[in-house]
Image: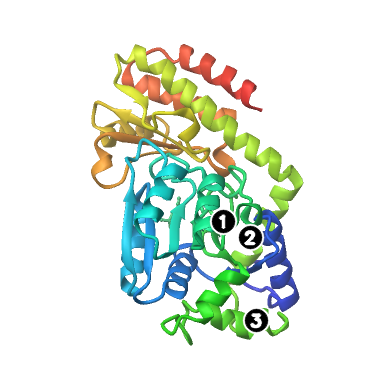
Amino acid sequence: MLLDLPPLTADRFAAIEDRVAALLRTASDVIVTQGEALLPLEAAIKGAAHPGSTALNIVTGPYGQTFGGWLRDAGAKVVDLAVPYETAVSAEQVAAALDAHPETGFVSLVHAEAATGNTNPVAAIAEVVRRHGALLMLDAVASVAAEPLLTDAWGVDLCVIGGQKAMGGPAGVSAVSVSDRAWERIAANPAAPRRSYLSLLDWKERWTDAGRTQLPHAPAQLEMLALEECLAAIEAETLDAVIARHRAAAAATRAGVLALGPLTRGALTPYVTRAEDAAPVATTVRTTGNATELAAEIRRRAPHLPVQAGGGLLSFTMLRINHYGPAATPETVLAVLEALAQATGVPAAPAVTAATEAWERAV
Ligand SMILES: *Cc1c(COP(=O)(O)O)cnc(C)c1O
C-alpha cells in the first residue's frame, strides 16, 4: 500500500507548507525541507551568515556547539555565549554580549533543548536581538507543539522545526520559515549556497517565487504524507491541548523526581535547577550513580520506556526522560517514575502521587 502511491502534487505540497506556517504562527515563506532538521539548520546558517561578519552563537546544549562549527565554516567570526546546561540563557546576558560586540549581525539560539532539558525565554531574547538589528535564527525542533512558538510576534527571522519530537511525526522532513529581512540578507550573501541541496535561495526561485506550481525535485513522499497526518492530528486535538499535554508531562515528571529525591538520599535530582527553565519535551535528572547503568536497568525492566542517559560526558551524570509526542501521557510518565523508583530500590507511591497531582494542576 505504501509503495504504490500516486505522485504528491505541488498543490498538496504547498498546502502542507501552509499548515506548517499556521503552526508556526507566521505569514513568512515556509519551506518544507526534504531531510532531517539539521538540513534547514545548516542551510539557514550557511545562507545568512556572511563571510567576515560577526555571529553571536548562544550555546545552551549540544546543538549550539554544532551551529558554531557551521558559522565558522561560513567564514563568520563567532562569539560564543555559553551557559551551564542546568540553566537557561537570559535576555540580559544576550544584551550584554551584543553590547560587547556591536557589529553582530546574526544570532543563533536553540529554543528548547531535548538533550539537556532546558528551554530559553525566546520572546525576551528576540526583542533584544531585534532592537540590535541582527537576524535571529531559532532551532525550534524540540519546542514546536510542546510550548508556545510565536515566530512573527517574537520577530524570529529563521525558525527551524522538525516533525519528530512533540509533533509526533516523521524525522525525514523538516521546515524553515524565512522572514523578508532574512531573504534580503541571504540574497546579499555572495557565499550563500546556490545550485546546492543547502540552498534556500534555489527553493525560493524555483518553488516559492515561481508560484509553487511545480516541485523542483521529487519530494520525500512518504515523509510528506506522514507530516500531513501529524498536522491533522495536532489540528484535531488542537495545538493548545497538545502544548498543555507536554507542559503537564514535564510538570508531573519533575514533581515525581523531586519526590524520589529524598527517598534516594539525593541520588536523583532535577538537572535543570529552576522549574521555569525546564523544557516541556524532556526532563533531565542529575544522578550520583552512573546514569548509563541506571538507564540500562530501567530498560531491562521496561524496554519501551523513553529513558536514556545523557550524551557524551553527560552519560555518567544525566538521565534523560523524554515525554514528547505519543509519550506525553500520564501513563508513560507514571510508568517511567515507577521504573525509576524500582531501579533505585525505593517505593514509587510518593512519586506517583506527586506526579498525578502535578499533572492535574497543569492541565
Ligand atoms: C532533536 C533536535 C534536533 C534534531 O536533531 P537529531 O539529532 O536528529 O534528533 C535539532 N535541534 C534540537 C534542539 C533538537 O532537540
Q: Which residue is mark 3?
A: 207
SS for callout 1: loop
- Mark 2 or mark 3, which is nearer to you? 3
Q: Position of residue 355 (x, y in %)?
A: 53, 20
Please tell me whether residue 310 is drawn above or below residue 45 in the rendered image.
Answer: above
Identify the residue under disc 1. 163
Q: Which residue is mark 2?
A: 227
In the rendering, at what x and y percent does residue 44 appear? 48, 69
Tell me the tag on residue 202: none
Q: Front-most of 206 and 347?
A: 206
Which amino acid is tagged 2? Leu
In primary-sequence order, the first of circles 2 and 1 is: 1
Q: Nearer the viewer, residue 355 or 218?
A: 355
Colour approach in the figure: rainbow
Q: Is residue 187 left or right of residue 114?
A: right
> Where ligand 1 lies, by image quadrant?
bottom left
Distance from disc 2 to disc 3, alpha carbons, whole Å, reads 19 Å
Does the image show residue 33?
Answer: no
